[in-house]
Image (cartoon, grey):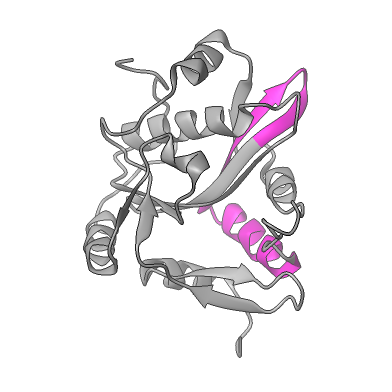
Amino acid sequence: MSRPITAELVLTGYMRGAFPMCEPVTGRIDWFTCDPRALVPLDARFRVPRSLQRVVRGGRFEIRIDTAFDRVVEGCARDRGADNRNWIGPEIRRVYGELHAMGFAHSVEAWRGGELVGGLYGVALKGAFFGESMFHVPGTGTDASKACLVHLVARLRRGGFLLCDSQYSNDHMAQFGVFEVGAQEYASMLEDALEADGRWDVEGDPLQGR
């Protein structure tokens, strides 16, 4: 890209429906949009598999918010092989760290036995949350990132958010009821969400009504 990436530029990109990614080999940062766009439902369409409900209810993980943001990004940045190359380069990590310091970027973390075993991070802007990535530690962190997603959705619901952007859909996310919309519908939903006043600093029952 011709201009350095900044926190302000990333926020502007989100407001226009775009997000940055780092090319794994060259380190070049480009901007992307996707059509269709994948969204995590914040209503009754959000599904939690029964096995995961048991994990959440049983308290396998201690869920913390924003206590280890940089470590969560580091966990997400690990190269997972040819089918899932690392797109979180040093500049991406720097700018999202700045967004965290500014109060826009957040992490949901799963801890077990005093160790960080999974988490996710993204950006909250008005009534929209833009999910970026998630990770778990194999073995001790099985289902950790999934549990974090359940807690994230509860927090967004309680805080009055209208949109949870997942960018792309995959089999992992489909089990939660993730759905796709076209570019025009996404733009309209984003506009509405950016006019809302979502609150991040609230908590909700992760399995309310289940």
Of 103 and 44, the residue lying toward us: 44
- Decide whether residue 98 is among the magenta residues: yes
112 vs 116: above or below? above
Name the quadrant containing residue 208. top left
- Residue 181: percent from the left, percent from the top? 28, 57
Of 23 and 159, the residue lying toward us: 23
171 vs 190: above or below? above
Range covered by the magenta-colored residues: 90-118
Q: How many marks?
A: 0
- Decide whether residue 210 is among the magenta residues: no
Q: Is residue 19 left or right of residue 81?
A: left
Q: Is residue 130 visible?
A: yes
- Residue 175: percent from the left, percent from the top? 43, 34
Name the quadrant containing residue 79. bottom right
Q: Is residue 106 visible?
A: no
- Residue 18: percent from the left, percent from the top? 44, 70
9 vs 185: above or below? below
121 vs 28: above or below? above
Residue at (31%, 38%) from the top-left corner? 42
The quarter in which the C terminus is drawn is top left
- Residue 95: percent from the left, percent from the top? 64, 65
Residue at (66%, 45%) from the top-left corner? 69
The quarter in which the N terminus is drawn is bottom right
Residue lying at the far top in this picture: please name it: 58
Residue at (69%, 39%) from the top-left corner? 68
